[in-house]
Image: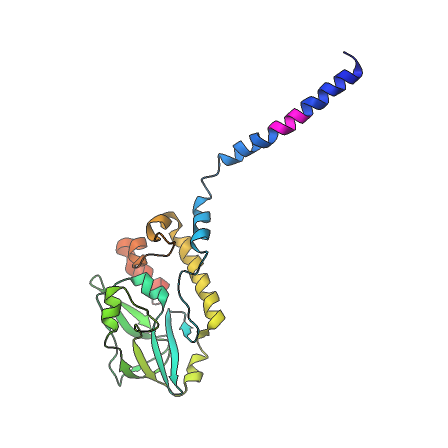
Amino acid sequence: MDFLQTKGLEYLLAIAYLVLLVPFWRFLTGSRGPAPQPARAVARAQDRPWFAVPDGFHFHRGHTWAREETPDLVRVGMDDFAHVLLGPVDGLDLPAPGSRITAGENGWKVRLNGDELPILAPVSGEVAEVNADAADIFGSGRGDPYTGGWLLKVRVPSAPGVLKNLLPGNLARAWMDDESRALSTAMSPELGTVLQDGGMPVAGLARELAGDGWRDFARRALLTD
C-alpha cells in the first residue's frame, strides 16, 4: 500500500470516529437524563404565577394585605398564598369592632384541624368592621381573598401613611415570585402530588406537604414561628 493510500485510510478512519462520537456522547449523557426532571418540572409549573397579586393592594410579608377605602380607613385580609397554603379552614377568630390591632403582631387566628394559627396584622389601627361572610368563604376554600374574602376594615390615622410600610405593585409581585420559588424548592420531591393538572398548587398545601407538621410549616411561611 503506497503513502497516499495509507493517508486516505487514516482520514476515513478519523471521519468515521467523529461521526460515531456524537451519538455515542448523546447516549452517555442521555443515560443521566432523569435526574434533572424535578427542576424542569418546577420551571414548567411556574411558567405562570402561582399566586395572584392584584393592583391596588399593599402586602405584608406575613401574607396579609391592606387596601385604602378612604383616607382614614383600610380594608385588610389574607393573600392568595395564605389562602392556598391553608386551604379550607374550620373557622376564623377575628377581633371585634372597637378593638385594636398592631402591624406585625398577631391580628387574628385561623382554626384548622383542631388547632389555631395566628396571622400577622398588616397595619395598626382600630377595627371598624368585620366581614361576617369571611368564615364561610374561607371554610369552603373557594372565593377570592381580595374581594369577598376580605376580613376587616380598620380605622387608621392616614391610609397612605400606613400603606407606605407595605409592598405595592411590582415590588409585591417580585416578592411573591421569590416566595413561590422558595416554596417550589421545598416541595420538589412531592411536586406531582401537590400540583393540580393545570400546574397550580392544590388548596391546603401545608397539610399536603408537611402532614401532621403542617402547623409548624405554615407558621414559618406566615412568619409567626
> How far across and down, in percent of the image, does residue 59 sit?
41, 72
Q: Is residue 179 above or below residue 188?
A: below
Quadrant where the C terminus is found in the figure: bottom left
Q: Quadrant of residue 211?
A: bottom left
Identify the residue at image location x=46%, y=48%. 40
Identify the residue at image location x=34%, y=79%. 75
> How far across and down, in percent of the image, does residue 192 sit?
36, 48
Q: Quadrant of residue 77?
A: bottom left
The residue lying furthest to the left in this view is 114
Total numbered labels: 0
> How far across and down, in percent of the image, does residue 26 sit?
55, 34
Main SS, magenta residues: helix
Identify the residue at image location x=33%, y=49%. 193
The residue lying furthest to the top in this view is 1
Identify the residue at image location x=60%, y=32%. 22
**Residue interval drawn in magenta:** 15-20
Q: Residue 183 colored magenta?
A: no
Residue 116 visible, this angle: no
Nearest to the observer: residue 13 or residue 124: 13
Q: Is residue 30 above or below residue 90?
A: above
The residue lying furthest to the front in this view is 198
Residue 183 visible, this angle: yes
Q: Is residue 11 above or below residue 144?
A: above
> How far across and down, in percent of the image, does residue 30 sit?
50, 35
Quadrant where the N terminus is found in the figure: top right
Question: Which of the colour schemes (rainbow, by chain, secondary structure, one colour) is used?
Answer: rainbow
